[in-house]
Image (spheres, rainbow, N blue to C red):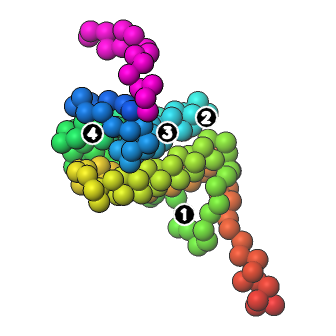
């Protein structure tokens, strides 16, 4: 492989613009760049989560998701570029089904917490939802692949299940939401 980054700084962005993969220059605060940033942040939070104790059954899936997110960033960076496929979504759905089968049904909402890895996973889930919202906003005015929108939607569902698996495997209970307002009203 050739060197992709032989020079780290170029000074071309000093005026508040950046280059897309197709050579187009856009403002660094454009929706497209914000969407790319949210996807990059999501990838980083998953990387942070992987520095903690995570069950072995999740490592390959989470690592593949990081690669998928890098590819998604490429799709956003290069208008009309498509790399994610239905198979990527199928993989997420298969992981959701497999992992969720190991969990007890929820009777209450859960709060972010439990183990540190699960808390990081909840953070990843919320960043994923933000990235999805940003991509939806971008799609109103610019071309975005339908697969990328579906991918982020499904990924946030998977991350919720992963949070619960991390806690379960560590024998740490999920933090259940307690509606004190409802309890006071019933008293």
The answer to which quarter of the image holds residue 136 is: bottom left
Q: Secondary structure at mark 2?
A: loop
Give percent across and percent down for residue 65. Answer: 39, 39
Residue 68 highlighted magenta (yes or no): no
Query: Magenta span covers which residues?
Result: 1-16
**Circle 1 residue:** 104
Disc 3 packing (10 Å; few <14; some 14–19; many ≥20):
some
Query: Which residue is painted at 76% across and 89% down in the image?
Result: 185
**Circle 3 residue:** 41
Q: In which quadrant is the C terminus drawn?
A: bottom right
Q: Secondary structure at mark 4?
A: helix
Majority secondary structure in the magenta region:
loop
The CA distance from mark 3 to mark 1 is 31 Å
Looking at the image, residue 81 sits to the left or right of residue 174; the answer is left
Query: Which residue is painted at 63% across and 47% down in the image?
Result: 119
The CA distance from mark 4 to mark 3 is 16 Å
**Circle 2 residue:** 53
Please name whichever residue, 105 or 4, is drawn nearer the observer in this view of the structure.
Answer: 4
**Circle 4 residue:** 75
């Amino acid at each position: 492989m050739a060197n992709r980054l032989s020079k780290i700084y170029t000074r071309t962005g000093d005026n508040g613009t950046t280059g897309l993969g197709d050579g187009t220059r856009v403002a660094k605060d454009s929706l497209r760049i914000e969407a790319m940033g949210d996807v990059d942040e999501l990838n980083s939070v998953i990387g942070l989560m992987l520095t903690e104790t995570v069950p072995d059954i999740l490592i390959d899936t989470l690592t593949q998701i990081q690669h998928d997110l890098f590819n998604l960033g490429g799709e956003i960076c290069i208008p009309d570029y498509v790399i994610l496929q239905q198979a990527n979504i199928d993989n997420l759905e298969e992981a959701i089904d497999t992992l969720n089968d190991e969990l007890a049904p929820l009777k209450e909402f859960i709060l972010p917490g439990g183990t540190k890895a699960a808390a990081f996973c909840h953070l990843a889930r919320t960043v994923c939802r933000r990235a999805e919202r940003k991509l939806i906003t971008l799609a109103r005015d610019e071309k975005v692949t339908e697969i990328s929108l579906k991918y982020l939607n499904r990924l946030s569902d998977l991350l919720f299940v992963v949070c619960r698996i991390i806690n379960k495997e560590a024998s740490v209970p999920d933090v259940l939401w307690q509606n004190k307002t409802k309890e006071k009203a019933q008293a």
